[in-house]
Image (cartoon, helix red, strand yellow):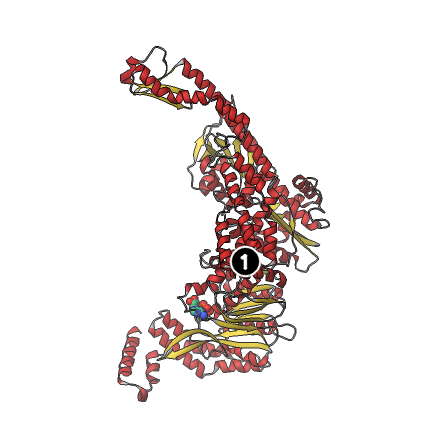
Amino acid sequence: MKLSPMMQQYMDIHEEYPDSILFFRLGDFYEMFFDDAILVSRLLELTLTGKACGLEEKAPMCGIPFHAADTYIVKLVEMGYKVAVCEQLEDPAHTKGMVKRGVIRVVTPGTVTSEAVLNERENNYLAAAYLDQNGMSVTYCDISTGELCTTEKRYGSALYEDMLNELVRISPKEILISQSLADAHDEKKMGNLTGGYIRVLPDSYFSENAARDAVRAQFGSVSLTALGLDGRDCCLLSLGTLLAFLLETQMQDLKQITECRFYEIGSAMALDRSTIRNLEITETLYEKKKQGSLLGVLDRTRTAMGARLMKQMLREPLNDAAAINRRLDAVEALVNDPLTRNDLTEALKQVYDFERLAGRIASGNANGKDMIALRNSVRVLPEVKACLSGLPGELLSTLARDMEDLHEVQEMITRAIVEEPPMTVKEGGIIRPGYSKELDELELSIRDAKTWIAGLEAQEKERTGISHLKVGFNKVFGYYIEVSRSNLDMVPDNYIRKQTLVGGERFVTPELKETEGLVLNSEAKINQLEYDLFTELRGKIQEFIGPIQRTSRAIAMTDVLNAFAAVSDRLNYNRPVVNDGMEIVIDKGRHPVIEQMTEDGMFVSNDTRMNDKDSSMLIITGPNMSGKSTYMRQTALIVLMAQVGCFVPAERAEIGVVDRIFTRIGASDNLAQGQSTFFVEMSELAYILRNAKERSLIILDEIGRGTSTYDGLSIAWAAVEYLCCRERHIRTLFATHYHELTVLEEKLEGVRNLSVDVSEENGDIIFLHRIVAGSASRSYGIHVAKLAGVPLVLLENARSKLARLEEESRTEEVRDAMTDEAAGEKKPREQQMSLFTETINPAVERLKNLDLMNLTPSQAIRELEDLQELIREQ
Ligand code: ADP
């Protein structure tokens, strides 16, 4: 038996894309067969059917309607599959025999372009990463906007880490690496660390010749020097791979990519993935929502381009004081001029996502509506420019200058396209009258005919006396005169029967047939001409892609700065002083997100003072839930906001530029990957200690919790000494439940104790959320347990155990050990064991400790009630 010709065609095409799922177009469906069908039906929960294929058994098959394909493709792509989209290359209606088919595009996570699924407020990056012993490079691109950037680093001691950090910052959806890199470093781990889908390609992609070919294919005669890549051999390899992969998957010219921007690593603050997540910069830690994150508070952007840029900027704060201050100058100018800000906001609201419009124009996917959207956006540019040029500040003037005039584009579109064009570009109705003489003449030539047809119904009704007579049109039969059954006897002789219906008959007349021929013929010509005129216009506008992209970048930045100003004004933020010093001074700082969630005026502001000398290590003790971690995060966020160029939630702030922020906070969800909490905690600590430099800022929220007390305390203690010693003073905020650490304030220069103030009223404890100097007197853990609803009997038991522990002065022992380093391990473990094996009756203990002389009668009654309850619970 032999495969049917169509199935043979399927097999032949699939053979060319063996690693992809083939979406094979059959009429209104994309079908999958054999293994692809079995796999996809399982993954997407589609019904698996069968199709006769010439073999004994039917071929397994599943399909999806073509108009819904985008969502299915994206689901598969997100699971890491490649999808090859195979279309009919001929119109089946006009083809005899088998329709020609071919793959027109391969979709992968980093190359999704469908508007329906791209998040307009987020970039969709594809990256390529290269590493060898001499250097590393990373290139990334968003094909929906045409942004292409590359960087490299040579001769470092931690090139792999540098590469990972860069990838984390970019946060690509897909990362291309070579087989050798995958062999040398666990690709799965790379995926976990960067959050991108790792695609391993043969080493041949990363060769110099292949790279040069790909760069030439994209940029033509433009030399590497002109691209700013002369001598950047490392860059060339990742850039070439990325371009080659794009050309292979997109199968068309990438006209939206007009330039390649080289940037230096280190010009932005490097934030690792766990810090971005822990500080909830762009989304919340657990629910992954924008609301509740820093971005959620700051994102008042009015354009999709601005929204994308803001997200990117928050992930890469600057570390050059001069550049930061340029942004702050711009924000200040906008804060000080609410009227202009208002005008600017109104103008920006009218700007469409013309960065992605430009992408669609370049790739030939734009329709008439896109053109009108581009025109409308361009039309407000003079307003935006006028707003900016009236304001002081170098950055704002640069942005105004970068916005090109583009009035030529505006005029071209206005002249050519009707105000409300249809979605499709092939069915006419898109070109404005007066634009093309030829088109107008064609329209005119059928105007009389169309008028005649329009008047035919009334005319024939009158002539024949048939009241139920209708003139209509359908695609199969063309124009017809429909007469209902009851009037058929009145039909005149010149009517020719064409079609019989249930309720009547359809006719034509020779005259109608002739006129129809004229109209349809001319309409086909008109549609074709309109299409040609439209593509010609699109081609002309393609020449402006570069200026359009430059303008859209300037618009995006303007939008972000304007949003910073709006938020700063509304939420009472102030301009920070940013300099190259080492001080971090914050007066009355607030946590930007928690402040918004707290009732008006109830957020307690706090001060921070740190430097690299006498207060580099702030050890914060205090009860759980009192506000330690809020305080530490707020300090980190204020630093981050300042270095992004935004005002900060503080009365005053002076920030000595921080090169990196590191955080070690809470349990990480790596637990799901089978690593213990303690192991994760230690890996994170190791990473921080190895990478932190003198300008870094470290947030440690509990260290050593996941192991036994002495183990944990020793590690925490050693970590403090490591970060705060003669050789280095790295600015660190360290919240800990190890009160013992607070003695280090006297021992080590740089250590400062802070605690959260607590007030006690009638035995109840109130957290004041106020940070004060000095260490906390107690941990109040039992109080917090009570708040959480732990049973009374347990609380009492815990209380008496605590009393015993304190009596036996174990903490004192530890303190002794800490002040006298020579004192090694004593006998604490045995003691610990004996404490835990002894059983104490809490009711008895409580009774024993009652101070009868100081008890009022009502307190005595309450005590009795409690005691009774305790005994009943036992
Ligand atoms: P800790 O780290 O000490 O366990 P958190 O910082 O998580 O405590 O704070 C617990 C809760 O207390 C926060 O979710 C917030 O609701 C509240 N809180 C913390 N700091 C403040 C503050 N400065 N003003 C008002 N409420 C605060």
Q: Position of residue 203 (x, y in %)?
A: 66, 45
Confirm whether residue 286 shows in the render: yes
Check the image and report above or below for 830 versus 483. below
Number of numbered tags placed on the structure image: 1
| Disc 1: which residue | 314
Q: Quadrant of the C terminus?
A: bottom left
In this view, the residue in front, 264 or 438, is 438
- From where the camera sits, is residue 505 visible? no
Q: Is residue 155 above or below residue 242?
A: below
For ligand 1, tell me if the residue under mark 1 lies within 8 Å. no
Direction bottom: furthest residue: 853
**Mark 1 surroundings within 10 Å by alpha-carbon count, few (fewer than 14), some (14 through 19), many (20 or more):** many
Q: Quadrant of residue 643?
A: bottom right
**Above or below — where is 783 with respect to 855?**
above
In-image side of 502 versus 331 (left or right)? left
Find residue 428 and report its horizontal and vertical position in percent: 49, 29
Q: Is residue 600 above or below residue 352?
A: below
State the image coordinates of residue 703 (x, y, percent, origin top left): 52, 69
Helix or strand or loop: what does disc 1 sit on? helix
Where ligand 1 lies, by quadrant?
Answer: bottom left
Q: Is residue 212 left or right of residue 567?
A: right
- 656 or 6, which is in the foreground? 656
Decide if residue 825 is on the left or right side of residue 473: right
Q: Amino acid at mark 1?
A: Leu
Quadrant of res 164 = bottom right
Residue 78 spot, x, y in % from top left: 50, 46
Looking at the image, which residue sits at the far right? 231
Q: Nearer the viewer, residue 855 or 526?
A: 526
Q: Nearer the viewer, residue 556 or 804?
A: 556
